[in-house]
């Protein structure tokens, strides 16, 4: 065993140490980097993941009678999380197809309510009247009640976020 063997061994050890340090550094980088990446893309991913809002069981809906559903919708805008309650009337005439209507009057945005005795929606602000499918019957509302896109899965009714 000569001096050159020793040198070689030293070089190998030194390379091994460098590689180990680089490896540890890389692992630390990944350990810190992944949560940072998740933190940055998290809200964007979350926002896109829940396009459908769960309203509730279709069993609750009376045939031919608009039934009021309420749901709390969580919205993430950047880092700001906010909660909003949405209300919608759901009408079915055959137990299979559902019309989901906003309860916001199309005149100036007051809340309409279903008046069972009259069989109509009534808006107390300026006496707007809508039929049970949301068409304008009388008063100043310029158009029918807005509708939500909806779907039923396993007996649960969902509406699409934003329409
Ligand atoms: S806000 Fe409903 S009739 Fe004016």
Image: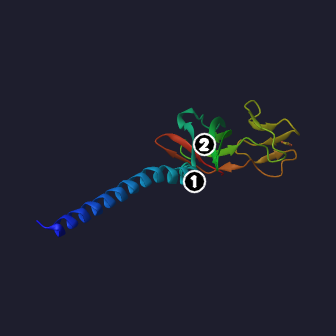
List the single residue furthest toward the bottom. Answer: 4
**Circle nearer the N terminus (2, 1):** 1
Q: Residue at x 87, y 47 (%)?
A: 140
Q: Residue at x 57, y 53 (%)?
A: 44
Q: Position of residue 19 (x, y in %)?
A: 32, 61
Q: Quadrant of the N terminus?
A: bottom left
The disc placed on residue 44 is 1
Left or right, 101 with reference to 9: right
Which residue occupies the foreground of this view, 50 or 13? 13
Element marked by disc 1: helix
Q: Position of residue 120 (x, y in %)?
A: 76, 38
Which residue occupies the foreground of this view, 55 or 99? 55
The disc placed on residue 163 is none
Within 8 Å: ligand 1 and the Cβ of disc 2?
no
Left or right, 106 with reference to 86: right
The disc placed on residue 93 is 2
Splitting the image into four quadrants, where does ligand 1 fall?
top right
Mark 2 crowd level (few <14, some 14–19, many ≥20, 10 Å Cα): some
CB atoms of marks 2 and 1 within 8 Å: no
Q: Residue at x 84, y 35 (%)?
A: 124
Mark 1 crowd level (few <14, some 14–19, many ≥20, 10 Å Cα): some
Q: Residue at x 42, y 54 (%)?
A: 30
In the rendered image, the vertical position of residue 80 relative to residue 70, given as above or below? below
Q: How far apart in space, not on screen, are marks 2 and 1 (Cα)?
A: 39 Å
- What is the basis of the colouring in this image? rainbow
In the rendered image, the vertical position of residue 146 relative to residue 73, given as above or below? below
Q: Position of residue 112 (x, y in %)?
A: 77, 38
């Amino acid at each position: 065993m000569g001096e050159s063997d020793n040198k070689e061994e030293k070089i190998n050890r030194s390379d091994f140490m460098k590689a180990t340090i680089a490896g540890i550094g890389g692992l630390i980088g990944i350990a810190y980097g992944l949560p940072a990446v998740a933190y940055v893309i998290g809200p964007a991913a979350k926002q896109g993941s829940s396009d459908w809002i769960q309203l509730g069981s279709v069993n609750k809906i009376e045939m031919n009678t608009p039934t009021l559903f309420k749901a709390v919708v969580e919205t993430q805008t950047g880092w700001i999380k906010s909660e909003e309650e949405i209300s919608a009337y759901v009408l079915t005439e055959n137990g299979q197809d559902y019309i989901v209507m906003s309860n916001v009057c199309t005149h100036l945005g007051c809340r309409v309510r279903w008046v069972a005795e009259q069989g109509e929606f009534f808006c107390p602000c300026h006496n707007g009247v809508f039929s049970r499918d949301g068409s304008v019957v009388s008063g100043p509302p310029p158009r029918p009640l807005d509708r939500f896109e909806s779907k039923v899965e396993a007996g649960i009714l969902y509406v699409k976020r934003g329409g």
